[in-house]
Amino acid sequence: MAFLLEKIANIRKTQNINVFLCGLRSSGKTTLLYKSLMNDWHNICTEIEPTTLYHYEELHFGGMKYGIWDFSGDVKVRYIPAYVARQVQATAVVYLVTGMEHSTTARNEMMDWIHSMERDDAFATSIFIVLFNKISPDEHSHSMEEYMKDNLLNKDRFLFLNVNVTLGLHDPNWVKALEIIRTHYKKHTTAS
């Protein structure tokens, strides 16, 4: 925990666009992060280890610096993103969803976590982007998107996109999400 506090103190001194990657375990958060940084990591899906607490990396893209926080999907540490958001401004919460999250239990767990962030004042100015991780083109996310829209507290704060996390920055919708986040950041920083 001391390392986390030190990391937060150092990050507060920089002008990063802080992006929080959240989602249940094995949703593709870490794969998306590291494929965005190292596209030539071809065996990432078999070599990547589950995140135990968080990863933090800086992504330089489009003339901007994104501070990407990849948080574990483990239920025991779900409070960590809210804690960090009280220390650094979370411009965006990017929530990854896979086809495996269609069971009632997984849906409830996912919506509980999203609702807790949606209600938390630490995320009051954050934009929420839900990325449906579609590694194979035959996966359908439409019913999950409708389910989420029907159950969100304020669906106007959310954007929904399909991505293939194994493509990293070669996925056009991930690039689109980063551009939307950049626009939100600029709008928010000029308003304050």
Image (cartoon, grey):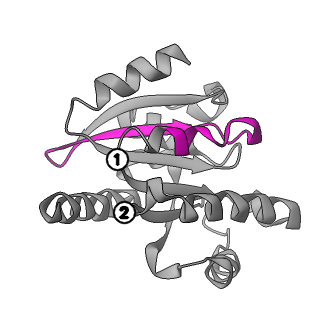
Asked if the stretch drawn in magenta spans residue 10, the answer is no
Does 125 sit left or right of 164 as displayed? Answer: left
* Residue 125 image label: 2
Image location of residue 128, percent across then percent down: 46, 64
Image location of residue 28, percent across then percent down: 60, 45
Instruction: Magenta stretch: give its range.
Output: 61-83
Q: Amino acid at mark 1?
A: Gln
Q: Quadrant of the N terminus?
A: top right
Among the 4 quarters of the image, the one containing residue 8: top left
Of 139 and 4, the residue lying toward us: 4
Element type at marker 2? loop
The answer for how far apart the CA atoms under marks 1 and 2 are is 9 Å
Of 162 and 106, the residue lying toward us: 106
Label 1: few (<14), some or many (≥20) within 10 Å?
Answer: some
| Mark 1 or 2, nearer chain start | 1
Element type at marker 1? loop
Q: Is residue 136 visible?
A: no
Identify the residue at image location x=25%, y=40%: 16
Label 2: few (<14), some or many (≥20) within 10 Å?
Answer: some
Of 28 and 93, the residue lying toward us: 93
